[in-house]
Image (cartoon, grey):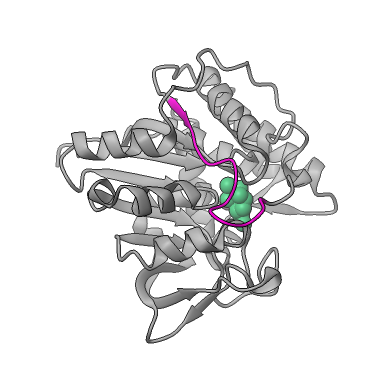
Amino acid sequence: MPDAKPRLTVIDTDPGIDDAVGILLALASPEFSIAGMTTVAGNIGIETTTRNAGRLLAFAGQEGIPVFRGAAAPLSRPGPEPLNLHGEDGIGGVNLPEPSRQPESRTAVQWLADLLLHEPAGTVDIFALGPLTNIAKLILDRPDAARRIGRIIAMGGVIREAGNVGPRSEFNLWADPEAADVVVSSGLSLVLVPLDVTRRVRATRDFAEALRAPAKPLASMVADLVESYFETKTHQESRPLHDPCVMLFALAPELFRLKDLRLSVNTGPAEEAGALTIEESGTSVQVALGVDGPAALELLARKLTAV
Ligand code: RIB
Ligand code: CA
């Protein structure tokens, strides 16, 4: 069967080391036509996440892809403190060029609305790799455009395991639980890729070394990113590749096990904020609950070393 037409895709992101791996995977995958990247504060502040998005595009020679600055803070709460997990520059100190073009003048939500109204309904997907503030603002402020989204695939939440911020809360949903509540309860086509799955797609130092061997630029940069991940969190044998699981799901859904769950988002006080509850009054969301981790890593390596 002839290759399907590349899927028009927006990456909403707070790069972030694992975001960067996912972004480079998307840029290496002809299955996606990246219309633009929208940035959000999360792992680190908005100026740095926006700069890092531009640096990754400059490194990959993809300066034609525009970057649009998004939310500097959550909808209604103070933003999270920068995570030192991603280093002072938010991207592990790896050797990336400076952006070769400035972010566009339109905001993330303005551009997303223009894009969605310009393209046929249902033809634009969004890969959400950070707090969901931009997407929630689009749903609230421009429902006429938001309803035209094809599919949102978001890294976020945790179902059966412990959270990585609170006992049951994962960083992206915890950072802006009101935004997560808007997106989950919107009824839009949403696939959630939670920690239960992303913790099973783990990069080791050997994986990084194997990526470096073919001396391909994007693969070598991902090796640098993975190794920087080890520097910022010591005594670890492997590091979870949370955000790349969004792209890996889009590329090979057969590697994942999906289940329809009716979910509600906790918008209560700090520690439980962003926690997900499965209940009849919740909204139906497709949730990835299983993954073939080794096959997902092999696909990541294959894509990165093919360019
Ligand atoms: O909990 C993991 C998520 O939080 C990832 O998106 C990581 O980049 C951080 O934003
Ligand atoms: Ca992220």
- Considering depth in this image, is 238 or 47 the residue closer to the camera? 47
Chief SS of the magenta region: loop
Residue at 40%, 54% (x, y): give it: 153
The relative height of residue 244 versus residue 76 in the rendered view (above or below) is: above
In magenta stretch: residue 303: no
Res. 179 visible in picture: yes
Q: Is residue 38 left or right of residue 224?
A: left
Give percent across and percent down for residue 37: 44, 33
- Considering depth in this image, is 282 or 27 the residue closer to the camera? 282
| Outermost residue, top side | 100
In magenta stretch: residue 69: yes
Tell me the quarter of the image containing the C terminus. top left
Highlighted magenta segment, given as a residue range: 67-79
Res. 248 visible in picture: no
Q: Is residue 224 left or right of residue 126?
A: right
The relative height of residue 284 versus residue 140 in the rendered view (above or below) is: below
Residue at 74%, 29% (x, y): give it: 93
